[in-house]
Image: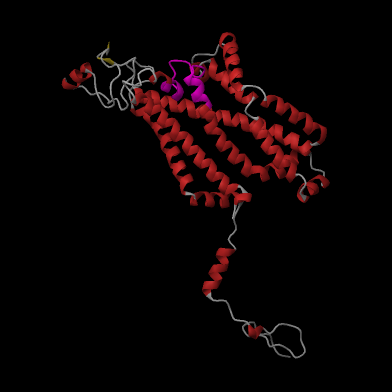
Amino acid sequence: MEKYDPNQTPKKRPLSLQLDVSAFEKATEEEKKQQDVMSESTTFLKDGLKRLRRNKLSMFGIIVLILVLLSITVAPSIVPYGYEEILSVEGKRDKGAKNLKPFTYSKAEQNYIKKGGERFPHIFGTDEQCRDYFIRVIYGTRVSLTVGFFASIIVLIIGMIYGSISGYAGGRVDMIMMRIVDIIYSLPDMLMVILLSVVLGSRISLPKTSFLGKMGPNMLSLFIVFGLLYWVGMARLIRGQILSIKENDYVLAAKATGSSSGRIIRRHILPNCLSVIIVSTALQIPSAIFTESYLSFIGLGVQAPMPSLGSLANAARGGLQTYPYKLVFPAAMICLIVLSLNLLGDGLRDAFDPKLRR
């Protein structure tokens, strides 16, 4: 009996149905490397991020957002002025520092510099109350981004819970919950903001040292309105996704193994809605920022002296012909933030939505 040699190609036996191994060629090293690349394991998140990096507009939006976040984080520790600080020179109020142009000094500051003193430049000039305009725009950007972030989180949590229950339960429960959504859709959000601002402004007293206390009761009413009204779009979107996903076989298998409804929603259904949740949350942030800026513009947003981009734009409206740059700076910041977030949201939708993949 012949010994088996693993390095020798076995010969095809007569009348055998096995393949003739000698008819095949060994794979080259290049083909082996190609197979390694083709078989590289990936995940939903890695694949989505890879697609996102290929989107130049989305990367531009990410870079702009990073620069904005760095500026609002680093600038207050570099600029020696406060957002409500009235400029003074040698302990005396500088009345000549009113409505200065960018990178200019008042006469008192010029004399102080001539004596050997140092004075940080006013990058965006000053306002009508002799306050540094650059630091006020920085703090206004902080407020707008904070409101947009927390409002989107509120919308995400309420909409995800409500939409998951409605879509998974179905039947009469779904019908009743969706009729409630239709009623909420019919409520005028602007009227609700005005009413809540009037009621909360007289009934609620917040600590002045707290974040909401500095922004005023109007901002608390804005968060409440977002929690009451703006989650309905997210709830409808998630409900529609769950209605189609819950009919899949793996959901039926989870039910057959005795998994609870909450576990099925958390472990099997919501992860498959992740793309819709990410995209909707990213697009909700600019909407919340624009709403806050609009309310601050009409006087229903941040309470003075805390600045907001909307309130700064409203204050600059009076001197539009004399000092037009005061309106340009907050308006340009709003445009940059909203444009960057919209570009990022579109890129996330293209990267994580399976229906848009080619």
Q: Residue at x 58, y 36 (%)?
A: 281
Q: How is the image coloured?
A: secondary structure
Q: Residue furthest top?
A: 202
Q: Give the total number of marks visible in the rendering.
A: 0
Rendered residue at 68%/25% (across/down):
184
x, y percent for residue 96:
25, 14
Q: Nearer the viewer, residue 189 or 120?
A: 189
Q: Is residue 126 left or right of residue 232?
A: left
Q: Is residue 309 visible?
A: yes
Quick check: 290 above or below 218?
Answer: below
Residue 264 lies left or right of residue 156; in this view the side is: right
> Split into 4 quadrants, where in the image is the N terminus?
bottom right
* Residue farthest toward the front in the current orientation of the protein: 321
Horizontal side of residue 41 vs 91, given as left or right: right
> In front: 34, or 175?
175
Does residue 72 appear in this view?
A: no
Q: Quadrant of the C terminus?
A: bottom right
**In the rendering, at what x and y percent does residue 338 appear?**
48, 34
- Residue 304: which quarter of the image? top left
Q: Residue at x 60, y 15 (%)?
A: 196
Horizontal and vertical percent position of residue 246: 76, 44
301 inside magenta stretch: yes
Q: Which residues are magenta?
A: 291-313
Is residue 289 a member of the stretch shown in magenta? Answer: no
- Residue 102: x and y, percent? 29, 26
- Residue 231 sits in quarter: top right
Closest to the observer: 144 or 93? 144
Q: Nearer the viewer, residue 60 or 325?
A: 325
Q: Residue at x 44, y 33 (%)?
A: 335
